[in-house]
Amino acid sequence: QVQLMESGGGLVQAGGSLRLSCAPSGRFRNIFTMGWYRQAPGKQRESVATITDGGTTNYADSVKGRFTISRDNAKSTVYLQMNSLKPEDTGVYFCNADVQVLIAVTRNYWGQGTQVTVAS
């Protein structure tokens, strides 16, 4: 059973920075697209940034120029560097990944979420 383990959330002042990390545990063959999503109180979960196994990235307009997604394929780890944080970035951040668990089987997994709180 594959699990995605996130770390790096916390409380930060507006204008500050945080770095989130996410790595899988368990057995798998490969990891394709990985991404970060967030959910603010009372709102739907939204995509923040994604990165393919080839390194192609995609960002929500609200974080472009402030957040950077990257991955270390050797460690199967995805990172989200968040700079110039704003109070509206507050929410639970979830890691997501398409994981090849068998030769012909790829499944989508979610992490348990990590809280990011930006104080004004």
Image: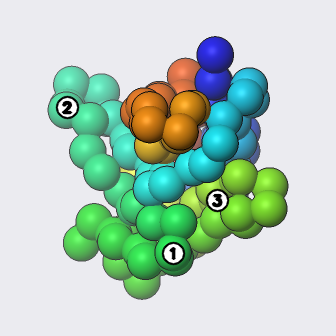
Residue identified by numbered label 2: 43
Residue at x-position 19% and y-position 32%: 44
Rendered image: mark on residue 38: none
Residue at x-position 40% and y-position 61%: 49
Amino acid, disc 3 = Tyr
Residue identified by numbered label 1: 54
User: Quick check: 40 left or right of 24?
Assistant: left
User: Quick check: 102 left or right of 6?
Assistant: left
Residue 95 image offset from top left, x and y in percent:
51, 40
Mark 1 vs mark 3: which is more N-terminal? 1
Q: Is residue 44 visible?
A: yes
Mark 3 vs mark 2: which is more N-terminal? 2
Which quadrant of the figure has residue 7? top right
Using the numbered discs, state the Cα–Cα distance from disc 1 to disc 2 in whole angstroms. 31 Å
Point out the frontmost of discs 1 and 3.
Answer: 1
User: Quick check: 102 left or right of 24?
Assistant: left
Residue 112 image offset from top left, x and y in percent:
55, 22
Residue identified by numbered label 3: 79
